[in-house]
Amino acid sequence: MEWFGYIEANFRYYPQCPLYGGQKHSYFSAAFKPQFFLKSSNSKHQLNFLAFARIDQYDTKRTHADIKDLYWHFNSKKWEINAGIKTVTWGKAESNHLVDIINQYDLLEGRNLENKLGQPLIQAAYSSQWGTFELYLATISRQVRFPGEKGRLRPGFNIDYSSTEFELKNGKYVPDIAVRFIKSINSFDFAISHFYGTSRLPLFIKVDSDSFIPYYEEINQTGFEMQWLKGPFALKGEAIHQFSKRGNIQAATIGIEYNTFYKAGPELKWLLEYTYDKRNKEQISGMNNDLFFGIHLNLNDKQSTNLMLASTVDLKYGTTILHSQAERRFGDLWKLHFVYTQILNSDNEDFYHLIRKDSFMEIGLFHFF
Amino acid sequence: MKKIAAKFIIVFAVSPFVGMAQDNGITIAKEADKRDNGWASVSMSFTMTLKNRSGQETVRKLHSYMLEIENDGDKSLVVFDNPSDVKGTASLVYSHKKGDDDQWLYLPALKQVKRISSSNKSGPFMGSEFAYEDVSSQEVEKFNYKYIGLSKFNEEECFLVERYPLAKNSGYKRQQVWFNKTNYRIAKIDFYDRKDLLIKTLTYSGYKLYGEKFWRPDQMTMQNHQTGKETITQFSSYQFGIGLSNDNFTQNSLQNAK
């Protein structure tokens, strides 16, 4: 058994004065991400483990630990079974993740919906010549957690997590069920999915002047995702239709990517994506009528240097997010990661209005083992 | 009358030679390909040692699986074992005799399989001196050929064949390949860029015979004459007869590759 992973030393600085009492200007934190896997000699059986923990200087809620993977994997010819805690990623778009519903978001780690909490589940997949069919049964619905009182990037109202409600009786334990069909036809890749169970994105119901409780609805969500490659271009898209007692919700993201290559090796990727989401303010990602434009430079060098600049603009309300990120490896075991996110012009109709003073700069130093 | 006849004879005499050179070229390439048919599936481990001009070395460790496909290019699954931050990253390629290869990448940090464009053929593989088009399956149909003649390399008698990549975005105008005259193993390849300058040379060494038919090198060295950099790829643990099939080369296999 071989352990590998990283330890991170992290520093975040928020230049603007905080909106809510208790919040600070800067935070040191440390993170630990250990992994291991075991596999049988013919690779038919595997045991996978991945855990994550972060400790924050001030925010006790941001200090958290989670098991993202602890599952047994078995494969035989066209079949595959996974059982245990697993992190699964669906979707094709870059700026937004609509169809990705199996795992709950780990909002303590990031607002881009790419960080997830481990999900207990059983997954069966069958790869045939017509495509791959997947079935998921997930239990123990995990819940969203915002940073705590001393933390930033959180709404100002108090959330009473202990009074969390589920629309489905025993919603926390009743298994969610999902199916997915994945296929590639030449340069066109797509997947169709359907999920029934407890929503991952809660509604926040006001209970008194300052307190909200999370409410997880019973939903059916059908999703479609696609990517079409044509030379240096890629067309990507995701769409969902969600049915709940409240009504129907539609959301879609469509984007185009253009790749330029330079003889010496660097690759420059241009991205333009548009999202429409009927959920508006509830959508904690803030993407409801937004245009995303980004450029990503990958030097393709020994040190895997890459750099990204992006901006997201809300076409109705004008909220603008500027995001920049750079990272590079030093030697074989060290990596430096730098992020700068600036929130501008938020409108009070937007979720971002609640965190409008939380623009930040971040440096992470990783040691891999 | 005589003049015309003479010209006629000259044209008539030259053209079959030109045709023959082309024919011979592709015949040799096809023979080399034929001699390597039937390996079915194989697994191997390899290291790539990247050396810069000052002799500094960086070592990359990988292991891979390959599947021979009838009437089309090979399928390959390559898993990166180091550096630690990319450990578990894997690449799945379906190469094709005609048109671009299909390629997917599994990124363990995102737990996501991404389909990527294989139009960046000339880009470096893992920062090495091997370009993507150098490491992908070298199908006979991907080139036009011309036989140059016999040439000796490292004491070996070889057929020297020039080949021209058909792909529009190849980084090369032409390549010269030395095929061993007896067993058709490749001994050396010279790469010429679009400006027809010699930029790289690839030498194969330490050939061993597996399964009584298949020659595989222990080492491939790519020297870049322009930058003075070099990448040495060393293969170990070749295992043939492992009975892999298409089921081991799906997007799901890619996600579970270890």
Image (tube, coloured by chain):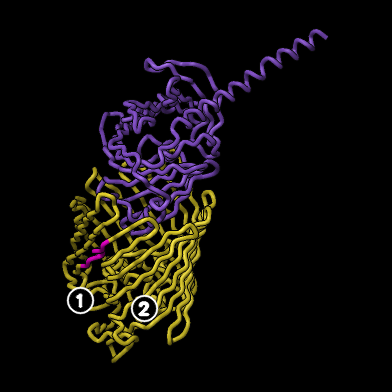
- The location of residue A357, given as percent across then percent down, is 31, 71
| Image position of B81 (left or right of B142) | left
Residue B57, compared with residue A270, is above or below; it is above
Q: Secondary structure at mark 1?
A: loop
- The location of residue A141, given as percent across then percent down, is 29, 77
* Rendered shade, chain B: purple
The disc labelled 1 sits on which kind of residue? Gly
Please say whether residue A169 is visible from this viewpoint.
Answer: yes
Distance CA(mark 2)–CA(mark 1): 31 Å
Q: Nearer the viewer, residue A86 or A333?
A: A86
Classify residue A38 by image quadrant.
bottom left
* Rendered shade, chain A: yellow
Looking at the image, the residue that sits furthest to the top is B2
The residue range painted magenta reads A66-72
Q: Nearer the viewer, residue A80 or B253?
A: A80
Residue at 55% x, 39% y: name it: B168
| Image position of B106 (left or right of B4) | left
The disc labelled 2 sits on which kind of residue? Ser
Please say whether residue A352 is visible from this viewpoint.
Answer: no
Q: Name the mark nearer the viewer: 2 or 1.
A: 2
In the picture of the structure, the residue carrying the numbered disc 1 is A22
In the picture of the structure, the residue carrying the numbered disc 2 is A199
Residue at 17% x, 65% y: name it: A55
Q: Secondary structure at mark 2?
A: loop
